[in-house]
């Protein structure tokens, strides 16, 4: 069978594809030649994007409260904004005021009473309970002692940790100083900023841009507000359950459960490690019982609190969320891990919007006589 000839349209498409591919390879090659310059540019971009993104995400949480006050007749905007900010700050201060003394007390008791027991366990008791036998434990301990493995590890770990903390602390302090001002100005001119952003796009696409912006704000905002309630709810339940089963330092362990819940899937695993390890070493409670308690907490969070609080789910496959955590975490560090889910949700909104508005192929109509119209 004779193959049909390549049309001019198809040939132009092939040429365009090859040109784009060659241009992309050229850009990648240039990027590898000037890696230091690109690192400087990306770090500068991240230093700008991170505070703006944080202010935007906080605004999505706060702005609906401002609109509620305005619908109640409390205005102008600066008045409703002031009320919301004052109430929010008062709630945060009250939580710290009432919770911090108990947390400090538990941490102090831990270092005064149990920290030395944990050190003694690793130096003495672990040898008797070592699953592979005392002889192998002695060989491993002798090897570590003779080679100064721990000392060498700490000598390289401490400087690198100090360098990492120093490199991370400055952007964090900068964001803490800049974000409140960005947030206030953004909330004061919320609609105006949206109109200015929409004016950048061509007029024929302005309506679609407004629709896309509303979808993004609605999806990400509802997720963030639901996640905050979810963290508080599961944290309170964890504190109560740990208290009921007689777990020492129940408040600290419960707070860990609530805080790490912001990280999907991995958060529950991270939260379960400290109480299980402590129960195993201290012997105050069966560690398998603590493991079962954490599995129950994860079940409650996934099957009760998630449907009740998070009314608008992300509806994304767990693999996509895990990949987004790894990807955005490598780009933005800890903040990337925390905000990976809303960023993935934003990408999902973009994709759905594109699918709904992409040009459809023109249908070929066949007339009753057999001819095409």
Image: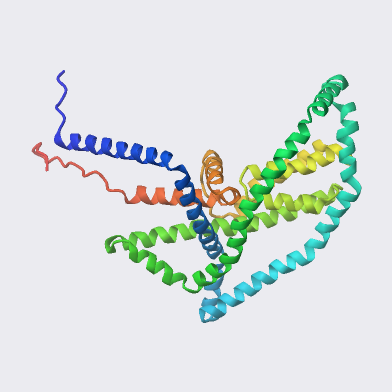
Residue 63 in sight: no
Position in image of residue 348 (x %, y %): 45, 48
Q: Residue at x 74, y 56 (%)?
A: 236
Residue 30 in sight: yes
Q: Residue at x 87, y 19 (%)?
A: 135
Q: Locate residue 207: give its quadrant.
A: bottom left
Residue furthest to the top: 1
Position in image of residue 183 (x %, y %): 54, 68
Asked if residue 101 is positioned above or below residue 146 in the image, the reply reads below
Asked if residue 291 is positioned above or below residue 204 in the image, the reply reads above
The number of discs equals: 0
In this image, 331 relative to 11: left or right? right
Position in image of residue 47 (x %, y %): 52, 56
Q: Locate residue 214: give its quadrant.
A: bottom left
Q: Nearer the viewer, residue 44 or 207?
A: 44
**Quadrant the N terminus occupies:** top left
Position in image of residue 341 (x %, y %): 54, 49
Q: Nearer the viewer, residue 234 or 46?
A: 46
Q: Residue at x 69, y 44 (%)?
A: 159
Q: Nearer the viewer, residue 130 or 248?
A: 130
**Quadrant the C terminus occupies:** top left
In this image, 323 relative to 238: left or right? left
State how the image is colored: rainbow
């Amino acid at each position: 069978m004779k193959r049909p000839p390549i049309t001019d349209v198809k040939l132009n498409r092939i040429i365009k594809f090859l040109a784009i591919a060659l241009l992309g390879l050229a850009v990648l090659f240039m990027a590898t030649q000037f890696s230091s310059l690109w690192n400087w540019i990306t770090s500068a971009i991240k230093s700008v994007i991170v505070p703006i993104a944080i202010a935007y995400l906080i605004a999505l949480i706060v702005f609906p409260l401002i609109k509620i006050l305005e619908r109640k007749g409390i205005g102008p905007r600066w008045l409703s904004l002031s009320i919301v900010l004052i109430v929010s700050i008062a709630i945060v201060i009250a939580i710290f005021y009432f919770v911090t003394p108990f947390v400090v007390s538990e941490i102090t008791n831990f270092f005064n009473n149990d920290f030395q027991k944990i050190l003694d366990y690793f130096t003495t008791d672990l040898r008797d309970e070592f699953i592979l036998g005392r002889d192998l434990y002695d060989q491993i301990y002798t090897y570590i002692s003779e080679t100064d493995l721990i000392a060498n590890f700490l000598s390289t770990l401490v400087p690198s940790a100090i360098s990492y903390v120093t490199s991370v602390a400055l952007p964090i302090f900068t964001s803490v100083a800049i974000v409140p001002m960005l947030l206030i100005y953004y909330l004061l001119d919320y609609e105006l900023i949206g109109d200015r952003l929409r004016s950048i796009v061509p007029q024929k696409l302005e309506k679609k841009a407004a629709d896309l912006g509303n979808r993004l704000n609605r999806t990400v905002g509802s997720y963030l507000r639901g996640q905050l309630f979810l963290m508080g709810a599961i944290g309170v339940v964890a504190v109560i359950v740990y208290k009921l089963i007689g777990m020492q330092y129940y408040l600290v362990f419960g707070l860990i459960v609530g805080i790490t819940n912001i990280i999907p899937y991995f958060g529950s695993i991270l939260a379960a490690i400290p109480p299980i390890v402590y129960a195993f070493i201290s012997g105050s409670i069966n560690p398998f019982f603590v493991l079962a308690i954490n599995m129950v907490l994860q079940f409650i969070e996934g099957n009760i609190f998630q449907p009740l609080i998070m009314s608008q789910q992300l509806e994304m496959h767990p693999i996509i969320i895990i990949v987004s955590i790894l990807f955005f975490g490598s780009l933005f560090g800890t903040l990337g891990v925390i905000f990976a889910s809303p960023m993935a949700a934003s990408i999902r909104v973009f994709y759905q919007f594109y699918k709904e508005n992409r040009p459809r192929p023109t249908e070929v109509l066949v007339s009753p006589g057999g001819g095409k119209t």
